[in-house]
Structure formats: structure tokens, C-alpha cells
């Protein structure tokens, strides 16, 4: 019955929250730079009576908001950061909203909005039924690049919470007990010696060659990793133009596994 009434409240306010999601889609801000998105979510939480702290754990776009008093303290988490280079209009084909701009490839415009909506619907039911406890909204920035939740945990913002519900936009509606891999991000810097690639290449030591050799080795390593592990990388910098042996190159790796 409580769930049905919460769904009813959401249906009554759906246009408001669809608008929030659409705005965050349009903002499409990089992790730790989600200024407009976090402000919008914080304003909605304040509108519905939540006590809101914006800028927790040393991150200007991190949110801690709560309503109610005492135990149990139940949390929901919302993300709202975007990814570079995948800006798109609201169409089912590739058509950039901003050429080479940021975009929501993982649906974090929906993620932050649905967490907000859940927190407000729970608050409505608690208030209506006189249910004691605290509902807390964690606005967790930079999921895609810097792992904002980690810094919020280190700050102790999860220490007193009984349970935290996580979710993510998917192709179907379902509930399950799943765990994500732990992630380490690391950047490798290589230094060599520059030379003219046509005039005297023997004098050069290519930093880019070093990166390519490492990448080849990593790709051979995949055969011997556990099934759940993932390694992916990009070359962030590899030289300026082909006729100059690059004396500096840099790669960026994500390494994922069930345990660090």
C-alpha cells in the first residue's frame, strides 16, 4: 500500500521530474564541474523541505541532503556527471547537441533525477504516515572520472547510515543484488628523447613506442586475468606530428576487479 501511494505521488509530479532530467541532459557537465546540475537538484530538495549541504567532502558539486529525525537513516544515491565527446540531441541516432561536447552516455541525467524522486516520494509517505526516521540523499559527483563517492566515504558521510540504495538506468526495470567492480585509475608518463624522424631517427627515443609496447603487453595479459577483471586505456598524449620523435607520451588506464 505504501509503495502504491509513493508511485501515485511520483505520477502526480512526473512532469516536474522529467523536466529536471531533461535539463541535466542539456547541461551535460564533466565530473566535479556539475555546477548547474547539482544546483538544480539541491534547489528541488530544498523546495520539498530537505536540509541541504552542497559542497561536502571538499567537492563543490557533492550533495548531502536529509529529511526527518533519528534512526533508521536510509540513503539513496544520485549521479549527474557526463562524458566527453558524446553530446547528442534527444533522438535515437547520432546527432550532436554541441559538436565534440559533453553528453550523457550512461544516463546520469536520469540517475540523479530518479534518486531525487525516490527520496521525495519516501519523504512524502513518511510525512503522511508519521513514520519516524531519516531519508538521506547523496549527490555523488564525478562517478565517470574521479569516483566522488570514495571521497564522501572517507569524509565519514556514510558512517551513520543503515542502508543505501543504489541503482542505474538500464534497458529494463528490475531489482537485484549485484556488486560493481572496484576501480583504480592510473596515468603512466613516459619520457624519451626527441629527434627528427626523417633526418636522424636513430638519435631519438620514442616515448610513444614505450606506451605501445606496454599496451601490447597488457593485451597479452588479458588471457591470464580472472573473468571479472577489466582493463581499458587511452593514449592521452603521443606527440605533436609524425616527423618528430616524441620525447613525452602519456596513457590513462582504468583497472577493474571485484577486489583491489
Image (cartoon, rainbow, N blue to C red):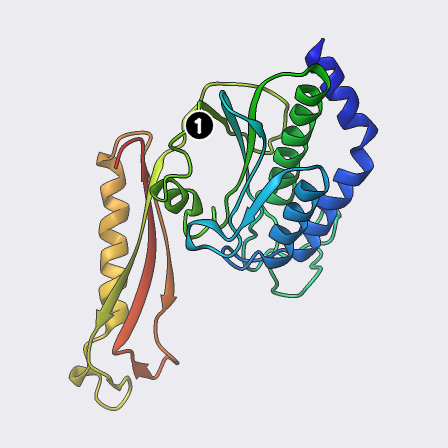
Q: Residue at x 66, y 20 (%)?
A: 126
Q: Please say whether residue 55 is visible from this viewpoint.
A: yes
Front residue of 204 and 112: 112
Left or right: 224 with respect to 176?
left
Residue 36: percent from left, percent from top: 64, 57
Q: Residue at x 57, y 56 (%)?
A: 34
Label 1 Cα neighbours within 10 Å, binned few <14 / some 14-19 / many ≥20: some
Residue 100: percent from left, percent from top: 60, 65
Residue at the extreme left: 203
Picture quadrant where residue 110 is located: top right
Front residue of 93 and 124: 124
Residue at the extreme bottom: 199
Q: Is residue 148 above or below residue 213?
A: above
Picture quadrant where residue 175 is located: top right
Residue 61: percent from left, percent from top: 53, 53
Q: How many marks?
A: 1
Front residue of 52 and 252: 52
Q: Secondary structure at mark 1?
A: loop
Q: Which residue is identified by label 1?
A: 161
Q: Is residue 30 above or below residue 70?
A: below
Residue 251: percent from left, percent from top: 32, 61
Q: Is residue 152 above or below residue 192?
A: above
Q: Residue at x 54, y 30 (%)?
A: 167
Front residue of 108 and 139: 139
Q: Which image quarter holds the C terminus?
A: top left
Q: Please say whether residue 92 is visible from this viewpoint.
A: no
Q: Residue at x 44, y 22 (%)?
A: 162
Left or right: 63 with respect to 184?
right
Amino acid at each position: 500500500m505504501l509503495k502504491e501511494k509513493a508511485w501515485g505521488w511520483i505520477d502526480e509530479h512526473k512532469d516536474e521530474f522529467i523536466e529536471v532530467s531533461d535539463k541535466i541532459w542539456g547541461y551535460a557537465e564533466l565530473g566535479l564541474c556539475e555546477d548547474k546540475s547539482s544546483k538544480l537538484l539541491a534547489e528541488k530538495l530544498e523546495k520539498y523541505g530537505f536540509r541541504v549541504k552542497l559542497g561536502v567532502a571538499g567537492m563543490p558539486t557533492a550533495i548531502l541532503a536529509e529529511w526527518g529525525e533519528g534512526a533508521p537513516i536510509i540513503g539513496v544515491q544520485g549521479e549527474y556527471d557526463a562524458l566527453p565527446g558524446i553530446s547528442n540531441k534527444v533522438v535515437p541516432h547520432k546527432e550532436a547537441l554541441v559538436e565534440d561536447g559533453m553528453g550523457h552516455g550512461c544516463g546520469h541525467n536520469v540517475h540523479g533525477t530518479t534518486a531525487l524522486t525516490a527520496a521525495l516520494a519516501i519523504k512524502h509517505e513518511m510525512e503522511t504516515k508519521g513514520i519516524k526516521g531519516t531519508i538521506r540523499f547523496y549527490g555523488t559527483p564525478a562517478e565517470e572520472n574521479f569516483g566522488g563517492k570514495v571521497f564522501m566515504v572517507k569524509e565519514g558521510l556514510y558512517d551513520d547510515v543503515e542502508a543505501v540504495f543504489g541503482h542505474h538506468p538500464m534497458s529494463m526495470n528490475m531489482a537485484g543484488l549485484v556488486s560493481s567492480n572496484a576501480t583504480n585509475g592510473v596515468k603512466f608518463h613516459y619520457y624519451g628523447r626527441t629527434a627528427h624522424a626523417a633526418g636522424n631517427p636513430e638519435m631519438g627515443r620514442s616515448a610513444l613506442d614505450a606506451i605501445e609496447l606496454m599496451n601490447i603487453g597488457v593485451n597479452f595479459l588479458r588471457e591470464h586475468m580472472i573473468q571479472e577483471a577489466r582493463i581499458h586505456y587511452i593514449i592521452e598524449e603521443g606527440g605533436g606530428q609524425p616527423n618528430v620523435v616524441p620525447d613525452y607520451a602519456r596513457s590513462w588506464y582504468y583497472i577493474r576487479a571485484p577486489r583491489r
